Each structure stands twice: as C-alpha cells, then as structure tokens.
Image: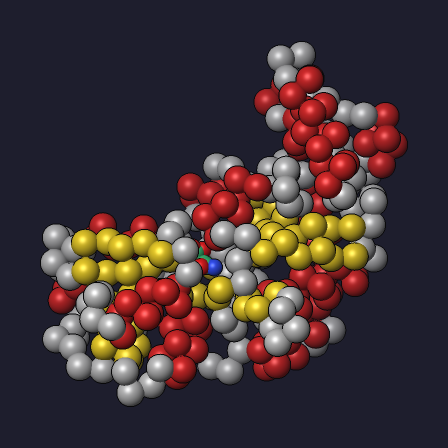
Amino acid sequence: MKKAAALLMLSMAIAFAGCGGAPQSDEAKDNTSVSEPDGGAAVSGTEASDGDLLADGVLTVGTNAEFPPFEYVGDDGEPDGFDIALIKAIGDKLGVEVEVENMEFDSLVASIGSKIDVAIAGMTVTEERQGMVDFSDSYYKAVQYVLVPAETDIASAEDLAGKTIGAQLGTTGDYMIEDFEGATAKQYNKAVDAVNDLISGRLDAVIVDKNPALVFADKFSGEIQYMDFSFEPEDYAIALPKGDAALADAVNGALAELKSDGTFDELVSQYIEN
Ligand code: GLN
C-alpha cells in the first residue's frame, strides 16, 4: 500500500470509529472477492480492505534486517536474505511489487495496517502476537539456541539460572530469559550487539534463534560457541493484518505454489546453509 493510501485508510478508520460498523470505501467494496467477516462491528477500521491491499500493485513489507540468514543488509545496502527473497517471490506470484521497510523488530507487529502491510522477519507465531495480527501458513521450523563464550561453565539449560543473559528486544529468546531463576535479562535492538557484549564478557549467554546462532558462532568462531538445549520448537510465518481473509488466502496460495514448484527449496539451499 502506498503511504498516502495508508494514511487515508487510517484517517478513515479513525473517522468511522464509533459508527458501529466496519468502514468500507466504495472502492474496497468493488474489490472485495470474498464474503465479509461476520459481525462487522467487531472488525476494526484497518481491516476493512479485504483484497484491497494488493489492488494498488504494491505490497509494503516490514522486516528487521539484523537476523542472518533470514534478513540482513546486503552489499548494496538493501535488505536481503531468505525472507526477503521469499516475499519477493510471493509478490511475483501475486503480480505486485514488493517494497521492503527496514525497521526495529519490536515495532513490526504494531506497524501492520499503518506503516506496513505485512511483516516477514523470522517471526515466530505466538499467542500474544496472534492477538494483534494474523499469520500466514508457517514456512520454517525454528528453535532457540544459546550462545556462550568458548570457555564457559554453562553446559545445560539449568546452568542459565543466575546468569546475565542477552537477547534481542521483543523476541521469543528475550521472553524466555525469565524462565531461568535469578537470571538477569539484557535486551538489545540487534542480536549482533548482544553477541559483541558476550565476546567482551559483559554477558554469560545470548539466546537467539538457531540459524542466526549458527551464523554468529561461525563468524566469531574461537570466541563463542552455540548450544542446543532442546527448547520448544517454533514456527516462522508472515504476519498479516487481522481479519484480511483475502490477503491471507492470496499469500498462502502463493506460498503453496512456491513449495510445489521447487522455488522454496531453491531459496532454502541458496540462503540457509545449515
Ligand atoms: N523468532 C524470534 C521471534 O519471533 C526472533 C525473530 C527476530 O529476531 N527477527 O521473536
């Protein structure tokens, strides 16, 4: 969605709030290809665009390009990585241009429906997030790993009790730290900043998703190592505006095609080494 259109929709949403029904412009009605959700009154203004987000030919996608190999800033200064390639392939299938906005991970979910249309950021499906956004079908299995210094007394999850542990703000790794009794949580905007504090001895451990952990362990090999304590498996999915069934169907349809025509596996082997 173009910014002007997004702003217009937002102001419409505000103007119509309190009217008791889901606002819908004539244009949106014309483009609606599926039935409206039941109980329009329960649907908020930013959701009134079933099918419409794709109508202007531009899908604005939020990411946080600090999470290799899923997203990182490429040599040309633009976001690159598995997720970026995947959402561009989805855009191709849907016949829309994909515009990527690089922003803080912690603000992605709240920006859907205003600054961005959807978000792809190695984002784990969680119940808390499902209260604010819908998710596409899951496209990748993940799990939290623990990065520790090359020399450490941490050998099991129990050993994390009482330790100073870093994580990226607002991530599932961040939310886990409170599970370890007496542990002190330190939050960072970028996982790599936590890794740097681990290397300089300011942290005892960093909790981060498996694939980025492998990338960091490789990049700083000899200084840090990764540990797999068999935490709960997680699922990555694309975060979508709540209640936009037409968009969810379109995205899931494109994802299924990319899986069946082999593109998805090609992207996995191109971007994800382990
Ligand atoms: N998968 C984790 C989460 O969703 C971390 C994602 C990230 O840092 N980009 O919270």
How far across and down, in percent of the image, does residue 67 sit? 48, 66
Q: Quadrant of ligand 1?
A: bottom left
Q: How many marks?
A: 0
Instruction: Say whether residue 236 is visible.
Output: no
How far across and down, in percent of the image, does residue 156 sit? 17, 71
Residue at the bottom extreme of this rendering: 222
* Viewer-nearest residue: 258 or 149: 149
Residue at the top extreme of this rendering: 19
- Which part of the image, by quadrant, shows the N terminus? top right
Q: Is 23 placed left or right of 146 in the picture?
A: right
Q: Is 23 placed left or right of 200 in the picture?
A: right
Q: Is 213 placed left or right of 29 in the picture?
A: left
Instruction: Say whether residue 176 is visible.
Output: yes
Q: Residue at x 53, y 47 (%)?
A: 108
Q: What colour scheme governs how the chains and residues are painted in the rendered image of this protein?
A: secondary structure
Classify residue 25 by image quadrant.
top right
* Viewer-nearest residue: 189 or 55: 189
* Viewer-nearest residue: 132 or 15: 15
Q: Residue at x 62, y 13 (%)?
A: 18
How far across and down, in percent of the image, does residue 260 sit? 70, 71
How far across and down, in percent of the image, does residue 155 sit? 16, 75
Q: Residue at x 13, y 67 (%)?
A: 159
The answer to whether 10 is drawn above or below residue 224 in the figure is: above
Q: Residue at x 50, y 71 (%)?
A: 68
